[in-house]
Every structure is written in C-alpha cells, then in structure tokens.
Amino acid sequence: MVSKKLKLFTAICMLVSAGAFAQTETGNTGYMNGGYSIYDSSVIPNKKMGQQNEFWNNSYSFPAKPRNMVEFGISTGIANVSGDVSTKAFTAPNFGFTVRKALGYLFSIRAEYINLSMKGQNWKASNGFSKNPAFGSYFAPVRTGTGAIVNTNAAGTRNATGDNVYYNYQTKLQDLSLQGIFTVNNIRFHKAKTGFVIYAGGGIGASLFRTKVNALDANNQPYRALFNSTFAKYAAEQNLYKRRKDIRNDLKNGMDDTYETEADNTRGRGASTPGVNGKTLKPSGNVIAGIAFKLGKRINLAIEERFTLVKTDLLDGQQWQEHPVTDPAQTRDYDSYNYASVRLNFNLGGKAVEPLYWLNPLDYAYSELNTPKHMKLPKPVYEDADGDGV
C-alpha cells in the first residue's frame, strides 16, 4: 500500500513539474516578462507614485516597487512526532492554512496555522513506567526504602509479578507561527523566469496540544493480559526488530482505539507550563524548506517539509528512560514533530502583480539593454572630416 502511494505521489510530482516548465515563457515581452508594464500606474501604490514619476521622467534610475498579491494556501500531509515512542506514519486529519506576503523579491513573511493528529505505538515492551501516571493501573517494579524491589501500582497495591506495557499515544496539536522565507532561485541571469521556486526559512510560534494514551480496554480495565501475553510470545526472538510488524498487529487486534487516559503532562506544575482547556501551551520554533510549481498566474502547487521543535519532552506522553527500571530518569532530549505536506496556494488581489518571489527583478534591465524603450540615449554625433556638413 505504501509503495503504491509513493508511486502515485511521484507521478503527480512529474506531471506538475512538466506543467510548470511548459508555462515558462521566453522572449522579450516587456518588464518582468509580461508580469507588468513599467507604464502601468494601476499597480503602483499612491505613496510611491513620486518615485515612479521620477523614473518615467528619467530623473531617477529605479522604478517603484509594485503592489503585489497576497498568497493564501491550504495544506494536507503526513505528521509525526520524533520522541520516545515509535511513531505511526499515516494519521489524519492533518491540515493547515497560510497567508504569505512578499516584502521584496527574495524575502517574504508568512503566517501559518496547522492542525495535526499524530499517533505512536511501541513494539518493544517497557517495565520502567512507575513514574508515568498514565499507566498507574499496571504493576511496575519499585525499590522501597529498605532496598527491596516490589511490584506496585499507583494505588499502592502490590503484586507478585510486574507487568509489561507497550507505550502508545495520540497527540492532537495546533500551532500558530510567523515565518520568514527566502526564495533562492527567482533571480535568473540566463532566462526571464522559472516555472518553479525553491524556498527555505524559519519562524517562531506557539503549540497547543493534548496527548492521551490507550491504557484501558472497553470495560475500563488494563490491557494486562494482552501486554503480558504479547511479551511472552516474542520473548525468545533473537531479532525482535524483524517481528515489529507482527507485534503491532497483535496489539492492534487486541486493543480498542479510544485513547481514553490522560498522558503524563506538566500542566499546572508551574507558570511556565500553562494549560488552555485541558491542553498544554508551549513556545515553538520551526524550519521549513519547499518547492512550488507554478500552475498559473494565480495558483501554484507546493511540496514542503516543516520541522518544529517544542520545549517539552511530552508530545508523546513519555519522558522516562527505561533504565534503571526501579528508578527511571528523564530522557535527555525534547520532542519535536515534522509535517510533510502538499500545498495549494492562491494569489489574491486586484491591481497587483504576482507575488514578487515569482518575478525576476533582472528581467527589466536585460530587456532594456536588448531593446531600449525607456532608456535615455544621447543624440548620435557623426564625424564630418571634410567639413561639408554631410
């Protein structure tokens, strides 16, 4: 199934690329290769008409920056948490919205909202969960004050044997951020413009998320029998990694999909970890890279990868190392998440040119050098060696 999806995705990208290159125009059709004419005052803001008039009158060398369209985009894709629990590749729904405005031909700013649903399921069993409140119904090994090791749950009940658990989670996350983006290939020295642009950038924002785990069955009872029997079934395997799909299938067949238990979190533990309606709010930083294919003057299709770092180790609801089992320590690194998306972007606005990152600012200069239309040329002076005026 995954192979078929990748093949379909590759075919779509090839078709989009072909369409984008087919729309790349050549030839001298005017300033910005037909993007707009330097004599079109409708795309010049009123506050910049003074500069434009000076340019028209050849008293200033540079035309005014035109008014350019605002880009509105929608996205959908694959989102995954990079943390302490193995992630599930395909989850839904994942979507987002963007508003982008060019400040120049290279730099633009973009506001982005994303709404993601991410899941994970470990295929290796864990025993060091005594400090994870989400699995308080299970018996974990704990060292007492006398040094003895006992198996106890959160209520203090002891059991002769300890349990195995398979960490899992469902994280529902919203993020709002402001990004700065650089376009790296719209300035062209040997052609008027391109049918695609490559861009990269980064930004800061805030992530609001809530993580839950599937710790109880439909009868509100722990998956004790399922977890322990699954562990016993594969305990003799020499290479457990090769059986990870089988383990996950066994767990999937025996578990519901409710994610009813609140995951370990830091809400209410201090002013630095505020909560909003039962969700955790954390500052975030992101880096992005993408490529956009032009489908028309007002529409383009982009493929983008976004990596976001959030100052928390609890995106996946797990922050404890497996060893030492009787006294778990916190893991070293914060969690992060990525969003690989396909985006459809629309250019909005009247009496404006395309977003400047789609235009080549050198086009006008090369056009004037090749076919002067506005250039102020000196009157030609011819030599008259014999003085006859001819």
Image: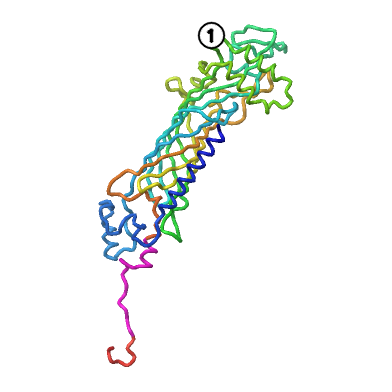
Please name the amino acid that badge 1 sits on: Asn
* Figure check: 345 above or below 369: above
* Of the pair 197 and 271, the residue shown nearer to us: 197
**What is the tally of numbered marks visible in this picture?**
1
* Figure check: 168 above or below 159: below
Colouring of the image: rainbow
Which image quadrant for residue 164? top right
* Of the pair 386 and 371, the residue shown nearer to us: 371
Give the magenta part as a residue range. Answer: 364-382
* Figure check: 10 above or below 368: above
Residue at 43% across, 32% down: 95
> Regarding mark 1 in the picture, which secondary structure is present there?
loop
Q: Which quadrant is the N terminus positioned in?
A: top right
Q: Position of residue 364 (x, y in %)?
A: 36, 61
- Side of 283 where 67 appears, left or right: left
Residue at 33% across, 49% down: 68
Q: Which quadrant is the C terminus positioned in?
A: bottom left
Q: Position of residue 203 (x, y in %)?
A: 46, 39
Residue at 52% across, 11% down: 218
Residue at 40% across, 35% down: 97
Crowding around mark 1 (Cα neighbors within 10 Å: few <14, some 14 to 19, many 20+) is: few
Look at the image and say whether residue 34 sits in the magenta stretch: no
Q: Position of residue 160 (x, y in %)?
A: 70, 7
* Of the pair 318 and 357, the residue shown nearer to us: 357
Q: Main secondary structure of the magenta part?
A: loop
* Figure check: 385 above or below 140: below
Q: Position of residue 142 (x, y in %)?
A: 67, 14
* Of the pair 309 and 165, the residue shown nearer to us: 165
- Side of 78 where 379 appears, left or right: left
Which image quadrant for residue 37? bottom left
- Label 1: which residue? 219
